[in-house]
């Protein structure tokens, strides 16, 4: 029996599964891309995923690291990869070492420290690009980008053998393109992410909006989270096809959240919204 009753969103051929409630647990996985944003308490459904992209070290986002790695080892899987802000690698290593001593068995791990602007390769043509957020020291978000090569227009009418001949001659017949598939902001205060093209044009945006009521703006600022007023301002600047809202507070009912989102966003933007933890969710 699975350890968690996870939320599920299907967008075209991609499935997003996970759980995200403020101060309780956040884990958002995309199995087809073989990666998971944050790890929460490590639900069983994500153990087979090879790449964990950790945004920051708060317990509700990172508590399951040791269990994830240990359970993979127990099941005979290869060591999982934890990609995390560079300043967290040492304390994560210390936690794993401590759990190894408690467990009586060495817990293998592949720890990768990243800084804003760096990339981690997930698959041969799939990369996670890191960007800075405003939440805790060193916190980051990730955009998963597919890198392809496209034939130059002047060669589009050529046959296969002709293209092969040009390649033999050392002629550059194509050029690189990047396709941003999904961006995960993680926990963050307002930042004008529209300044980063790969975020603004990601097909899918997974974004926190923690606080919704007017009197909660101070709480949002104190915790370095987004209030609906900031969230709405940011969403209207972006061109994402789908927006998945995570990290909702339990201080406000889901019914109220739906109403406030609808009142705060333009009709065009609201149509893109999918509340991750809403059991009455509209599928895009």
Image (cartoon, rainbow, N blue to C red):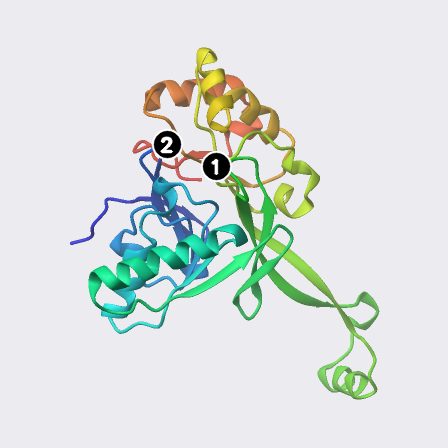
Residue 72, by quadrant, is: bottom left
Identified at 44% across, 22% down, the residue is 211
Res 159 seen here: yes
Where residue 81 appears, as percent x and y from the top left, is: 42, 63
Position of the C terminus, as image quadrant, is top left
State how many labels appear. 2
183, 68: nearer the viewer: 68
Q: Is residue 141 above or below residue 78?
A: above
Which residue bears the numbered disc 2? 22
Q: Is residue 227 above or below residue 152?
A: above
Neighbour class for label 1 at 10 Å: few (<14), some, many (≥20)? many
168, 137: nearer the viewer: 137
74 vs 144, left or right, is: left
Identified at 58% across, 40% down, the residue is 240
271 vs 281, left or right, is: right
Whether label 2 touches label 1, CB < 8 Å: no
Label 1 SS: loop
* Label whose residue precedes the other's in the sequence (2 or 1): 2
Which residue bears the numbered disc 1? 187
Where residue 122 appears, as percent x and y from the top left, is: 51, 64
Where residue 269 appears, as percent x and y from the top left, is: 56, 29
92, 273: nearer the viewer: 92
| Marker disc for residue 102 | none
Identified at 69% across, 68% down, the residue is 149
Label 2 SS: loop
183 vs 248, left or right, is: right
Where residue 276 appears, as percent x and y from the top left, is: 38, 37
Seen as rendered, the residue at the extreme left is: 1
Position of the N terminus, as image quadrant, is bottom left
């Amino acid at each position: 029996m699975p350890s968690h009753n996870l939320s599920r969103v299907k967008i075209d051929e991609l499935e997003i599964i996970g759980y995200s409630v403020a101060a309780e647990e956040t884990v958002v996985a995309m199995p087809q891309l073989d990666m998971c944003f944050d790890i929460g308490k490590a639900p069983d459904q994500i153990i087979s995923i090879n790449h964990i992209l950790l945004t920051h070290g708060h317990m509700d986002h990172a508590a399951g690291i040791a269990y994830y790695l240990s359970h993979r080892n127990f099941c005979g899987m290869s060591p999982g990869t934890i990609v995390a802000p560079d300043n967290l690698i040492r304390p994560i290593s210390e936690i794993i070492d401590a759990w190894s001593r408690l467990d009586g068995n060495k817990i293998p791990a592949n720890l990768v420290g990243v800084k804003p602007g760096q990339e981690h390769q997930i698959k041969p043509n799939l990369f996670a690009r890191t960007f800075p957020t405003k939440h805790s020291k060193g916190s980051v978000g990730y955009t998963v980008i597919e890198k392809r090569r496209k034939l130059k227009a002047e060669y589009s009418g050529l046959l296969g053998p002709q293209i092969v001949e040009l390649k033999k001659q050392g002629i550059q017949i194509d050029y690189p393109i990047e396709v941003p598939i999904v961006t995960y902001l993680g926990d963050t205060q307002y930042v004008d992410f529209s300044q980063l093209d790969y975020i603004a044009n990601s097909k899918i945006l997974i974004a926190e909006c923690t606080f919704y009521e007017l009197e909660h703006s101070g709480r949002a600022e104190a915790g370095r989270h987004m209030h609906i007023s900031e969230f709405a301002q940011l969403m209207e600047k972006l061109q994402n096809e789908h927006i998945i809202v995570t990290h909702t507070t339990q201080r406000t009912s889901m019914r109220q959240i739906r109403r406030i989102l609808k009142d705060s966003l333009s009709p065009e933007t609201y149509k893109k919204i999918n509340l991750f933890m809403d059991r009455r969710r509209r599928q895009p």
